């Protein structure tokens, strides 16, 4: 169930996603980027964090993209997200919001995606593993591929803005 926590149907600022028995799955907040808003501060923080991020081509792209952002949607995962397909319900809400227009994702301790949902900026810790869908910017075109985050050669190529050798193009 999706219920309105703050605002009204046309100007909501906070939604609560729950299982039918009331167990909370996620809180979704919508904040317009306006002068002096928390969203404006968030954009400024993101821009400040880009200085040492790799690949440099993605950081440069984000420096031009982020100042154009009009709204930030925040998804706070709650206890019900990890049970009874709560993650699928949250993904459905996220996908519905994503479909409304050009959007990127940012996840703490992971990084940013591009508008197609491919991961473009490395902010993972060194112990990260597993398959991941990523993209690098080559001649102003995003080249998506699937990689293993634990593969050191793949990681080093990505950080240089290159498609890793042996990575599967998507």
Image: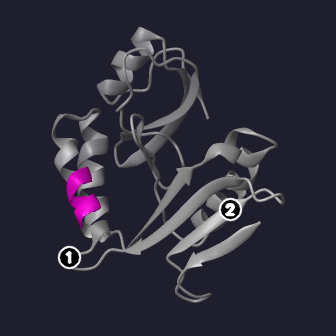
Where is the C terminus found, in terms of image quarters? top right
Question: Could you tell me residue 113's position as x and y percent?
Answer: 45, 46
Instruction: From the viewer's side, name the closer residue of 18 and 44.
Output: 18
SS label for mark 1 = loop
- Residue 126 located within the stretch drawn in magenta: no
Q: Main secondary structure of the magenta part?
A: helix
Given the current orientation, which residue lies at the most extreme top position? 152
Q: Residue at x 68, y 55 (%)?
A: 24
Quickly name the residue at label 2.
Answer: 17
Q: Residue at x 54, y 23 (%)?
A: 147
What is the quadrant of residue 55 in the picture?
top left
Q: Residue at x 47, y 15 (%)?
A: 165
What is the quadrant of residue 34 in the picture?
bottom left
Is residue 138 visible from the viewing direction of this image?
A: yes
Left or right of 17 in this view: 19: right
Left or right of 75 in this view: 20: right
Q: Say if 84 sits above or below 72 in the image.
A: above
Task: Give the CA separation, mark 2 to mark 1.
Answer: 28 Å
* Circle nearer the N terminus (2, 1): 2
What is the quadrant of residue 111 in the picture?
top left
Identify the disc placed on residue 36: 1
Magenta segment: 41-46
- Residue 43 located within the stretch drawn in magenta: yes
Q: Say if 52 sits above or below 126 in the image.
A: below
């Amino acid at each position: 169930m999706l219920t309105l926590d703050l605002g009204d149907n046309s100007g909501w600022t906070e939604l609560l996603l729950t299982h039918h028995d009331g167990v909370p799955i996620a809180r979704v907040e919508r904040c317009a980027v306006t002068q002096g808003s928390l969203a404006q501060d968030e954009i400024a923080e993101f821009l400040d964090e880009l200085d040492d991020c790799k690949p440099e081509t993605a950081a440069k792209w984000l420096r031009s993209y982020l100042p154009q952002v009009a709204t930030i949607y925040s998804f706070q995962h709650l206890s019900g997200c990890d049970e009874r397909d709560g993650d699928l319900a949250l993904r459905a809400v996220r996908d519905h919001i994503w479909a409304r227009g050009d959007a990127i994702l940012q996840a703490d301790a992971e990084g940013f995606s591009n508008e197609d949902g491919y991961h473009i900026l490395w902010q993972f810790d060194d112990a990260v593993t597993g398959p991941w869908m990523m993209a690098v910017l080559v001649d102003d075109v995003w080249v998506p591929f699937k990689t293993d985050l634990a593969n050191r050669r793949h990681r080093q190529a990505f950080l240089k803005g290159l498609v890793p050798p042996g990575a599967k193009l998507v």
